[in-house]
Amino acid sequence: MSYPIPAAQARAEIEIKKSRFIAYACGIESREQGQQWLESLKAQYPDARHHCWAYLLGDPQYAVSAGMGDDGEPSGTAGKPILNVLQHKGVGDIMLVVVRYFGGIKLGAGGLTRAYGQAAQAVMAQLLIEERVAQKRLLISCDFAQEQLLRHWCQQVEGGVEQVHYHQQVEMGLQIPVKHLPAFLAQLESVSCFYQLLE
């Protein structure tokens, strides 16, 4: 199954009652990667009052992991509205961080919720997306003479070579787009090699 993911990092800024809300959206592969990116933004804006965030991993309709953080704002007023925007936009493998500089005027719980939601909407409007194509992994053992042919077939179906090990035979780890898998497997049947579908 394919789904939209960020193609590049995006940034947007809004001001509400003298408070600055600087929003960033970025593609991530794991929660750990997201936390590292959050730490880099904290280092970039060390004097900001709050660094609130949310993320979604996997297909946005059936996210494998999601999380959020209010970073000192009243519970539910920052991370939750950011996560709501992510879920509504239907983009996967994404993290959104909103950096807030307090302007001296309190916004109240409702005002904060709206402000963080608006900042998240603003950066999502700037975000370029691309399609993540579902892939299937294969492990193939073949003769040395067949390696270039298999690489060529893999390239034809927009697949990728993950790894190659040379022993008595060549062992190749490939990623093939699911939509091209039947055609690729049919080609494999025409040569004498052993393959195994992973996962």
Image (spheres, rainbow, N blue to C red):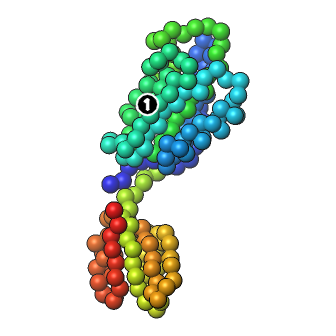
In the image, residue 124 above or below residue 17: below
Residue 157, position as x, y percentages in the image:
40, 72
In the image, residue 55 above or below residue 3: above
Q: Quick one: quadrant of the C terminus?
A: bottom left
Query: Amino acid under label 1?
Result: Leu
**Residue 39 appears left or right of 177:** right
Query: Residue reaching furthest bottom?
Result: 145
Query: Residue at (61%, 7%) from the top-left corner?
Result: 105
Query: Residue at (28%, 72%) from the top-left corner?
Result: 182
Residue 59, position as x, y percentages in the image:
37, 46
- Please name whichever residue, 90 or 140, is drawn nearer the observer in this view of the structure: 140
Query: Residue at (60%, 41%) from the top-left corner?
Result: 37
**Residue 197 appears left or right of 25:** left
* Residue 185 picture quarter: bottom left
Q: Quick one: quadrant of the N terminus?
A: bottom left
**Residue 30 appears left or right of 193:** right
Q: Which residue is mark 1?
A: 83
Query: Residue reaching furthest front?
Result: 167
Residue 130, position as x, y percentages in the image:
46, 51
Question: Would residue 191 be visible to someone looking at this image?
Answer: yes
* Residue 139 picture quarter: bottom left
- Please name whichever residue, 163 or 151, is drawn nearer the observer in this view of the structure: 163
